[in-house]
Amino acid sequence: MTDDSGDRDVDGRDVDGQDHDGRDIGDHSIDDRDLDDRHGDDRDDDDRDGDDWDDDGQDVTDRDDDDRDVEDDGDVDGEDDSPERVMTLFRAHNQECVARFSPQEVQILRQSMASLAALLTGEPDPDDPVVDRLFPDVYPTDPVQQAEFRRLTEADLRAAKLDQARGVLADLLHAGGEVRLTPERAELWLRALTDVRLALGTRLGVTDDTDIEAEIDAAVGRDPGSPRVMQLTVYLYLTYLQESLVGALIDGETVRSVDSPEL
């Protein structure tokens, strides 16, 4: 699988053929509008292949004549801040995992994956906490055995993670649009999303107990234009996207089980 020659990390450097610091992950230069003014996937699966899309690829199923969102309870509201309504999520459709990405969402995903690829192709820094998260010790109480294990396995693990990040990059069109993933391809995306979230979350100090939305609110309160606000928002987006992909895989497996019952 080859990577797009135009892929660059967040500092504008080529992913391949350069030495990288390994600390680029998290330095996203993304416009604050990237996650705004987009509609989620609260629509029936069959609508994807129908005529309920406007010229910009937006779902118009649940719009009134004034082009405002119509809520399920009948209320008309021009704005909805829930994550499910403002970002693209995966759905199961015809035994595939399907999502329709905007150009801004593609930019976020490409920058995230390119930053991860830059980290993986650079010289590993043993003092970098992101390296510890991506390649955790298997023998933490036995330094000698751990060093031997790392010597034997890290190169292959690093190459596999790089292939996964490049695989996601290969699936994304710069202009946005529909992405259809087979179950096998969806598993690759899940592994790549896990790696990029681990890397970005480590940079941001995210733990299992972190309330990301509360962190975003706190960061906005301190400085609405700070890089941390956008980085936390990107982390939240990647989290919802990964969760939706897991759900689509489960739903697709249910459909496949119904279509092919065991005899």
Image: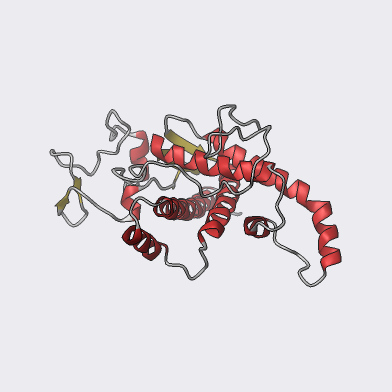
| Quadrant where the N terminus is found in the figure | top right
* Quarter where residue 177 is shown: top left
Question: Which one is in front, 23 or 119?
Answer: 23
Q: Residue at x 31, y 45 (%)?
A: 36
Whole-percent x and y of residue 229?
Answer: 39, 54
Residue 164 visible? The answer is no
Q: In this rendering, is residue 231 above or below 1?
A: below
How are the colours assigned in the image? secondary structure
Q: Is residue 23 left or right of residue 61?
A: right
Q: Residue at x 39, y 52 (%)?
A: 226
Q: Is residue 122 left or right of residue 9?
A: right
Residue 92 visible? The answer is yes
Q: In this rendering, is residue 221 above or below 169?
A: below
| Quadrant where the C terminus is found in the figure | bottom right
Q: In this rendering, is residue 59 above or below 79?
A: above
Q: In this rendering, is residue 183 above or below 235?
A: above
* Quarter where residue 101 is shown: top left
Whole-percent x and y of residue 258?
Answer: 50, 52
Question: Which one is in front, 241 or 63?
Answer: 241
* Quarter where residue 186 is shown: top right
Whole-percent x and y of residue 149?
Answer: 82, 58
